[in-house]
Amino acid sequence: MGSTKMKKSPIGIEPKNIWESRRFQNLQSAIERYNEAMFPIPVEWIEEYNEFVNRL
């Protein structure tokens, strides 16, 4: 008699909403660090931050 084993699916990809949430938090933290250190904040960061805010 052969045993039927259930195959586990391979590891997939992190859901987009989780990745985006983490990215947004990292972006906020980086902007705060640069601001506190009085470094210019890269324009790309501001643009990406604004994209996130507009979607919320």
Image (spheres, rainbow, N blue to C red):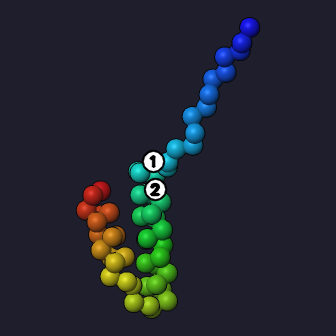
Q: Which of 7 and 45 is in front in this view?
A: 7
x 34%, y 78%: residue: 44
Placement of 36 over or under 9, stated as above or below: below
Q: Label 2: how many residues lie within 10 Å, few (<14), some (14-19) or many (20+)?
A: few
Residue 14: image x %, image y %?
49, 49
**Image marks 2 and 1: residues in contact by CB distance under 8 Å:** yes
Residue bearing the label numbered 2: 19
x 62%, y 28%: residue: 7
Residue at disc 1, secondary structure: loop
Q: Residue 54, which numbered label?
A: none
x 29%, y 56%: residue: 56
Q: How far apart are marks 2 and 1 (CA)?
A: 6 Å
Residue 11: image x %, image y %?
57, 43
x 32%, y 63%: residue: 52
Residue bearing the label numbered 1: 15
Disc 2 marks a residue whose amino acid type is Trp
Judged left or right of residue 34, residue 53 is left
Q: Nearer the viewer, residue 11 or 1?
A: 1
Question: Image quadrant for the N terminus?
Answer: top right
